[in-house]
Image: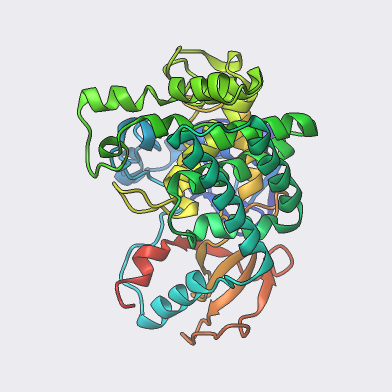
Amino acid sequence: MNTLDVSSLEPGQVFSAPVYIDDVNLLVPAMVPLRNREIDLLVSLDITTVTTEGTIVDIDEFEIPDLIESIEPIESIESLEPIESMEPPKAMEPLEPIEDEPVLETKKEAVKFSIKDVQQNSGPYRIYRGLIEKAAAIFTGLKSGIDIEMRAVNNIGSQLLRDLRENTDSFIDYILGGEVTGHELAKSSVNTAILSALTAQELHLPNHKILTIISGALLHDVGMLRLSRGITEKKGGLSDAELEQIKSHPMHSSKIVTRELFGPHEVNLIALQHHERWDGKGYPDNIIGPAIDIGARIVSVADAFEAMVSKKSYRNSMAGYQAIKNLMADNGRRFDPAVISAFTKVMGIYPIGSIVKLNDNSVARVVKVKPQAPLRPVIQMLLTKNGQVLKEGEGATIDLLAERTLFIKNAINPEESAGTNE
């Protein structure tokens, strides 16, 4: 097996044998030209070497199948802007497509078991729900015209950061599982704040800046309170006039932060700029690249991910795996690439709660991710390779970084796989 430095890889290179990430996860098949997409993926994950049993070959020496000529590059997520377009997002072509073929009844049972298995009386769950209820109380007060102090928002942020240190995996699990219902704006805001805090920590920002970003994330969409429910809860597409109203919500958020809460300038920037784009095509001010506040850049990524994995009135949730792939396909259009890289390390290629099929056809649930090995998380078995559904507590927990004979073949969309059999 030959080991290749990622720094030596170039677009257009063709290898006589498949090229793998960490020995078993396929990067590119034999005789298929390497593209910028694969190289950028390796760089974003800080992967420095790949392996292959082949060598670089002259493509002219071989007859390349017509199929290769028809390969389409991965699409951007330009159309995946739920708040802006309020349209069902266009399906992306992932590197490893989510399984959508019919599945065995036993697999359905295993998936249903895994996503329903939340101990709602546990300490972490009560803490998470309590954060949402406190945020909802603030939003209710603002909507009703009751005077709310910025200190109340900051207190939620401080508690969130303290509790996040002990409950990171549980909080991510709840975000992706969607177990809490009701208080949709508050839930979305708390989820975005959690994801923003983790990303800011990965970027090694100082603690006071992280607290500011959390407060900004909690308030980024508070301007939605100034829009009619007929627009914010409308199913299906919006008219051009309705879209313009949706696009006004960052300015409403800014006014609430500055004129009602008397919040600091840094929080206002997050509220105002979280829909600006890295390429300058965002709103309301078409700010470009690093000129966008770092907190707003972080909240933008966290908000987009949260929107993709959460159920909205106009579409179903997306699997965490697919949402990560969509973010990674952005290619510097909407998001700061450095923030995308940090976010991906925090969440992993297969986020906590992802249902995955292994190379031996067993099914498992991701229970912990590892920034240093995003393709090899810790999993808990749900379905054996022989089709046996494992009851609660029966499934072995396996660290794929240590167990090299197993690897993830592909992700499974929990909603599609669980079917309609309740």
Q: Is residue 225 visible?
A: yes
Determine the residue positioned at 56% across, 44% down: 135
Residue 341 vs 317, above or below: the answer is: above
The C terminus lies in quadrant = bottom left
333 and 129: which is toward the camera: 129
Pinpoint residue 343: horizontal percent, then vertical percent. 62, 40
> Residue sitting at 48 percent across and 26 percent down?
253
Q: Is residue 120 above or below residue 46?
A: below
Identify the residue at the far left of this view: 239
Drawn side of residue 45 relative to residue 64, left or right: right
**For residue 381, above or below residue 269:** below
Say which of 313 and 121 sits in front.
121
Q: Position of residue 38 (x, y in %)?
A: 53, 39
Write the residue at 70% across / 44% down: 49
For this view, does 252 lie left or right of residue 237? right
Viewport quadrant of the N terminus = bottom right
